Image (cartoon, coloured by chain):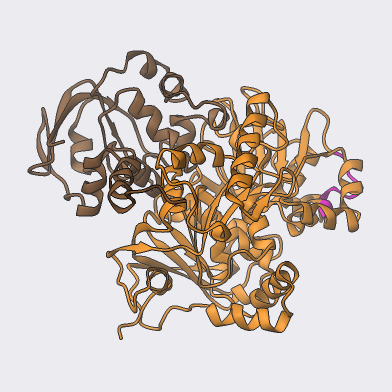
Chain colours: A brown, B orange
Amino acid sequence: MTVVRGRVWKYGDNVSTDLIFPGQYTYTLRDPDEMARHVLENLDPRFAQEVRPGDIIVAGRNWGCGSSREQAVTALKHAGVSAIIAKSFARIYFRNAINNGLLPVICPAAVEAIQAGETVEIDLRTWIVRCAAGEFPFAPLSPTVLEILQAGGLIPLLRQKLGVALPEERP
Amino acid sequence: MAAKTFAEKALARAAGRTAVTAGEVVDVRPDVVLSHDNTAAIAQIFASLGVRRVWDPDRIVIVLDHAVPPPTPQHAQNHAEIRRFVQAQGLRHFYEVGRGICHQVVSEEALVLPGQVILGADSHTTHYGWMGAFGAGVGRSEVAALWATGELWLRVPDSMRIVLRGRLPFGVTTKDLCLKVLGDLGADGGLYLSVEFHGPALREWSLESRMVIPNMMAEFGVKNAYLPPDDAVFDWLAERLARRTGRPIPECRDRISAGALYPDPGARYVAEHTVDLDRLEPLVACPHDVDQVRPLREVAGTPIDYAFIGTCTNGRIEDIAAAVEVLRGRRVAPGVRLLVIPASQVVLQEAIRRGYLATLVEAGAIIGVPGCGPCMGNHMGIPAPGEVVITSMNRNYRGRMGPRDVGIYLASPAVVAASAVTGVITDPREVVG
């Protein structure tokens, strides 16, 4: 994961997990494809039908506020979304994104500049977002976070680590 | 040593370090890990780790509360899977359908104590700040990782101080205080922060009134919230810890108070705000954001279809008492439904003992099974598309209760009850007056 490139879907402030993945599905839907079919249905019914692999979501402040439900991340990931660029993220959503290998980028200036539908690039070598309006730097992710993202998420990382730490399954 | 905030002290202790500073990333070993109906999904992730036994069965708490009793075969199957996991892992702290909402149950059972760290797969895990514990919400994968290793990375948050001056006027509650904070500072005003409340008024409030505050601060974006614990907190928890463990109350109380943590004078805060309680008035959060807060008087008269009192924010006996005071001798307006769901079985029993249920039912209220009810749009009282709801719950995002075009107003329980009586958003002081 060095450069992430994708087409933009743009949304506003305070998009809650209720809009991203409705609560009524949280204990019944576990099939990733089915989850992806309902993602964002309360905000933008077109999204689930038209999203393409690699697409990037660009959002305002406090993306993913509200419930801790992790499906608000995994459903987007299964729908093919490669990254989310926001002015800010709700804190549990930020953690859930990292823990599921979905790149969260905090870059308010880029959010202002990016237009819906354009193709943008997130460069993790130089920590820059490139779009039609120019280049916008963002704060590098911490080593802890990068390690998890590069492993594909917390659980894949933990599997690697446990595989080393626990050669035999514990009784 | 440098002066420390509550969050710095609590996370240092949980990380086994002498001191940590805001901004550091630390590996924390929480005292309690909480999950609810999402436990089956977490167990599935846990199984993929190849670890057969959880790290410490006594530190894991599971409460079935989000869709209880189960409304569909799928929900029932979900609960059945959780019971199998609980049995296979030998988990003692498992609470069945109907016992109550996880945060209320964990408090009532004194499963978390002041100064401890609880991480839960639920955004309202901020709740435990009422007793001066560090509570933070995490995701399902993180809980699976915790079950396996007992450890999780956390960034030590910066802290905000909210200083409370004066006293709340009659008819104004801690729910209004929370709405004031949200309205003034925004739904992301506390993002990533630990928010501490200080001021003499806190000690005068019932514990139930205090519980509203850190619970509702989840809507402020915070990592955790904190109220300094006092004797009332220690006494309340000691009685319950003694009941659960069979140890003498004085011994429990000593243990509880010894764990309490208080920020040092001179600790570093990135922001400080003062709220003049004397000048607060009843407030309402309007659709579709928790920070669309307006004075009750400005939205009074708005017609409603449905009123709901309950949830981990405002479903305790004090909240039901406030509703009963408004509803006694009155009727829910024609065409309006009022649903009341006690936060726990203990609250329900107390409501029965005090005769509140009779009053509520006579007034035309519907009584629900202790649990989360329709709060997240699962079941037990979903509004119809296009309807307007007033509720004591904690969030009003579009689609929260199911249909996307339901307008949800958030207010204190008395305001919800008064609105149910008149059919329009109403100041309870006018009804009871």
Which quadrant: the C terminus of chain B? bottom right
Residue B286 makes an appearance in the image: no
Q: As drawn, which residue projects farthest toward the top? A: A49
Say which of B287 and B393 sits in front. B393
Q: Is residue B407 left or right of residue B321?
A: left
Q: Give residue A104's position: percent from left, percent from top.
A: 27, 40
Say which of A133 and A107 sits in front. A107
Say which of B241 and A18 sits in front. B241
Q: How many marks?
A: 0
Q: Quadrant of residue B257?
A: bottom right
Q: Is residue B325 magenta?
A: yes
| Whether residue B135 is situated above or below residue A66 in the rendered picture | below
Residue B380 makes an appearance in the image: yes
Q: Give residue A162's position: percent from left, percent from top.
A: 33, 49
Q: Give residue A80's position: percent from left, percent from top.
A: 30, 23
Q: Is residue B135 magenta?
A: no
Which quadrant: the N terminus of chain B? bottom left
| Whether residue B10 is situated above or below residue B100 in the rendered picture | below
Say which of A68 and A119 sits in front. A68
What's the residue at 60%, 80% (across, down)?
B255
Q: Is residue B210 left or right of residue B429?
A: left
Query: Where are the magenta residues, as a range?
Result: B324-331
Q: Give residue B36's position: percent from left, percent from top.
A: 59, 45
